[in-house]
Image (cartoon, helix red, strand yellow):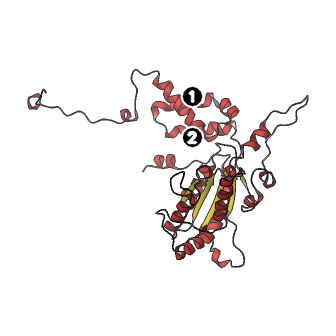
């Protein structure tokens, strides 16, 4: 692979993400590269909150941390899609069985990172969420819940559970992603009055999060929370310029043109890291409107010349 191809395939960490990513990298090395078994008096608290407005790249950073920086297996589960143990009325395999299978499969790895997305959705005060929070507690407390079956619905041997719990305790890092969108919306809302005060965004602290999630869940995570800010106009411009390098030439110029032209709109609407995806579609539609025929990706690949056939060898049958 050429150096150019390699550079395009490498994950790009944007400036507003980099301080958070660098700090997560340092902590991940401590969590996964230190022999925790040597520390007998205490267990390391390796659960962390990664928060920020929707679209700022929380899932993206967690995956990049695992797969590119730490080179360890990565599992992402979402609170919105979580299936409780023994809950078969929604179909599919319960989430904890998938977690158990992932841990057991990678038990000889240097370590693993589990990303729990949409953690703020566990805030609702319902019977379902009470059981859900108990299962999330189990992940954070490095223990397998009672009554768990594997993905084949078979009873799990106690020795397998013991090995997985040991791996959870010594070789797992848990990152919970949450938008807490209300916090950002409330802080960015225009203030009323004759002399509105400065409307700058203040990063929420741990005590602010207890208004949305129970303290018993919040306290299972480190007091050091990682906060991704809203992208600035310069960040949006860098997104477009960086992503344009990996776009086919036929769409690239229009992608850059539209991306730069709509920077203020992206900033106003807080589009986040999904902005380039929206611009790419607009660019394809715009270029397509100038074509007499639609050009596909296959049309950009040189085709072999057709093989000439001898008409005398063609048999035509009429039914």
Q: Eyeballing the image, is 288 above or below 107?
A: above
Q: Position of residue 162 (x, y in %)?
A: 57, 75
In the current view of this chain or complex, which residue is farthest to the right?
194
**What is the secondary structure assignment of the residue under circle 2?**
helix
Q: Do callouts 1 and 2 mark residues in contact (Cβ within 8 Å)?
A: no
Image quadrant in which the C terminus is located: top left
Q: Residue at x 72, y 46 (%)?
A: 180
Q: Is residue 232 left or right of residue 308?
A: right
Distance in Å between CA atoms under marks 1 and 2: 14 Å
Q: Which mark is residue 160?
A: none
Q: Residue at x 55, y 74 (%)?
A: 163
Q: Position of residue 48 (x, y in %)?
A: 69, 59
Mark 2 packing: few (<14 Cα in 10 Å), some, or many (20+)?
some
**Is residue 24 in view?**
no
In which image quadrant can residue 197 be found? top right
Mark 1 packing: few (<14 Cα in 10 Å), some, or many (20+)?
few
**What is the secondary structure assignment of the residue under circle 1?**
helix
Q: Residue at x 47, y 46 (%)?
A: 4
Q: Earlier in the sequence, mark 1 or mark 2?
A: 2
The number of numbered badges drawn on the structure is 2
Q: Eyeballing the image, is 256 above or below 85?
A: above
Q: Name the residue under label 1.
A: 257
Q: Mark 2 points at which residue?
A: 242
């Amino acid at each position: 692979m050429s150096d150019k191809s390699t550079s395009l395939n490498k994950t790009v960490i944007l400036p507003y993400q980099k301080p958070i990513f660098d700090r997560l990298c340092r902590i991940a090395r401590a969590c996964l590269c230190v022999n925790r078994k040597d520390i007998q008096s205490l267990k390391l608290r390796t659960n962390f909150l990664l928060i920020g407005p929707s679209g700022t790249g929380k899932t993206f950073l967690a995956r990049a941390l695992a797969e590119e920086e730490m080179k360890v297996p990565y599992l992402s589960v979402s609170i919105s899609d979580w299936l409780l143990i023994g809950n078969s009325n929604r179909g599919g395999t319960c989430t904890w069985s998938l977690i158990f299978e992932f841990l057991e499969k990678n038990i000889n790895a240097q370590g693993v990172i589990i990303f729990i997305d949409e953690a703020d959705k566990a805030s609702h005060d319902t019977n379902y969420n009470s059981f859900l929070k108990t299962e999330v507690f189990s992940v954070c407390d490095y223990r397998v819940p009672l009554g768990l079956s594997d993905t084949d619905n078979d009873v799990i041997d106690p020795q397998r559970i013991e090995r997985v719990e040991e791996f959870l305790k010594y070789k797992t890092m848990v990152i919970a992603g949450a938008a807490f969108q209300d916090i950002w919306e409330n802080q960015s809302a225009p203030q009323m009055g004759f002399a509105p005060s400065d409307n700058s965004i203040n990063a929420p602290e741990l005590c602010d999060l207890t208004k949305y999630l129970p303290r018993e869940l919040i306290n299972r995570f480190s007091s050091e929370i990682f906060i991704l800010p809203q992208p600035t106009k310069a960040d949006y411009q860098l997104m477009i310029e960086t992503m344009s390098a990996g776009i086919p030439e036929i769409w690239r110029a229009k992608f850059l043109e539209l991306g730069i032209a709509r920077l203020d709109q992206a900033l106003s609407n807080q589009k986040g890291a999904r902005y380039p995806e929206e611009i790419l579609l607009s660019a394809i539609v715009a270029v397509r409107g100038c074509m007499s025929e639609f050009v596909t990706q296959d049309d950009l690949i040189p085709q072999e010349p057709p093989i000439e056939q001898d008409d005398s060898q063609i048999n035509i049958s009429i039914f």
